[in-house]
Image (cartoon, rainbow, N blue to C red):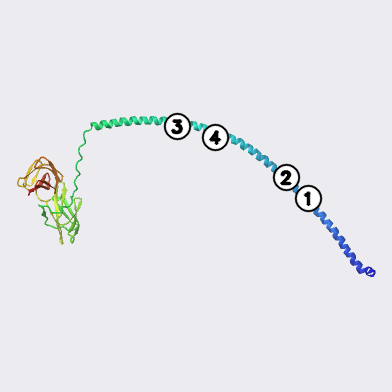
Amino acid sequence: MSEILKNPVVTGVGGGIAGLLVGSLLSLSTIESKVGSSMGRAMEDLSAVVQGDDAALSGVSERLAALEASMSGNAEAVAGLGAQVAGDFGERIAALEARIDTVAQDLGSQISQTAAAQAEAVRGALEAQPAAAPAPEAEAAAVSAPQAETPEGLAMLPEARGVGETFVLAGGAVRAFVQRADAEAGTVLLSVNGGTAQLSPGEAITVRHDAGACRLALSEVGADGVRISSDCDMPAGDGAAYGPGEMASLGDGQLRVFVSGILGDAARLAINGLAMQSLRVGESHAVENCTVSVTGIRGNRVLLDGGCS
């Protein structure tokens, strides 16, 4: 053992190991010293920053306190202003309502007085106004409704007319335009003095015109066109037409017809008495077993036909 320790190699290795251990211990001591110094400086800087923030926070707190005090003062001022405005506005509203009530009362009184005066004036005018005359009878249409049977005394016109052509009667006072003709159905649509009439063979209409009234009827619808019958161009004839103030004796003297007046296509007649009858052209009136018919009007003369059974 002593020989080993005396060996220079062993001695050198042991010295090296011892040197390493001592160096390590010295290095650790130096590191701890440096770390402690750095931590101290960092803590000092942090303390300085925190102290600065505390000062800033203190200033902010003071400003907030001042702002709260200012807001409290403004709230009191606003509350006072609101109370003042409410009081003034309420007084003005009350005054306006009172004024409106006064104006409404005055206006109502004036309206009542005016209405009463107007009602009294209207009542007086109505009492002073004479009774209204009865409304006149409605004016007859230019063309009457078709009659189912052809009246007596009509003559067939010699010429036929096709669609688009016109029958001219009573010196141009009556114009019958053929709008449509159906040969199979035997019907025709005529436009007569502004009115329209659809006729079948044998049906007749009364046409009013400036010179009186007359009748026309559909005779037939054939290959050559439409043929009609009419008394519009027939003269009144002696003993067949009567003017206002004249007396007609019909039915072998059993009918005495007094002509009171003629208006348009109607005549006012007194038949076997004083009672008046208004008959249009084509209309009839029965008296007991007798009948009087108005067959036409030529100017100021009426054509009458009558008979008794």
Judge the density around disc 1: few (<14), some (14-19), many (≥20) Cα neighbours within 10 Å. Answer: few
Report how far apart the C-alphas of labels 4 and 1 lie in the structure.
62 Å
Looking at the image, the residue that sits furthest to the front is 288
Q: At which x and y percent is residue 11?
A: 92, 67
To which residue does mark 2 refer? 52
Element at badge 2?
Answer: helix
Q: Which label sits on residue 97?
A: 3
Q: Disc 2, disc 4: CB below 8 Å?
A: no
Circle nearer the N terminus (2, 4): 2
Q: Which label sits on residue 14?
A: none
Q: At which x and y percent is residue 118?
A: 30, 31
**Rendered image quadrant of residue 268:** top left
To which residue does mark 1 refer? 41
Report how far apart the C-alphas of labels 1 and 3 lie in the structure.
83 Å
Q: At which x and y percent is residue 109?
A: 36, 29
Circle nearer the N terminus (3, 4): 4
To which residue does mark 4 refer? 82
Q: Disc 1, disc 3: CB below 8 Å?
A: no
Judge the density around disc 2: few (<14), some (14-19), many (≥20) Cα neighbours within 10 Å. Answer: few
Left or right placement of residue 282 versus residue 4 in this view: left
- Towards the viewer: 263 or 18: 18
The amino acid type, in three-letter code, at marker 1 is Arg
The amino acid type, in three-letter code, at marker 3 is Glu
Circle nearer the N terminus (2, 1): 1
User: Residue at the spot x=37%, y=31% of the render?
Assistant: 108
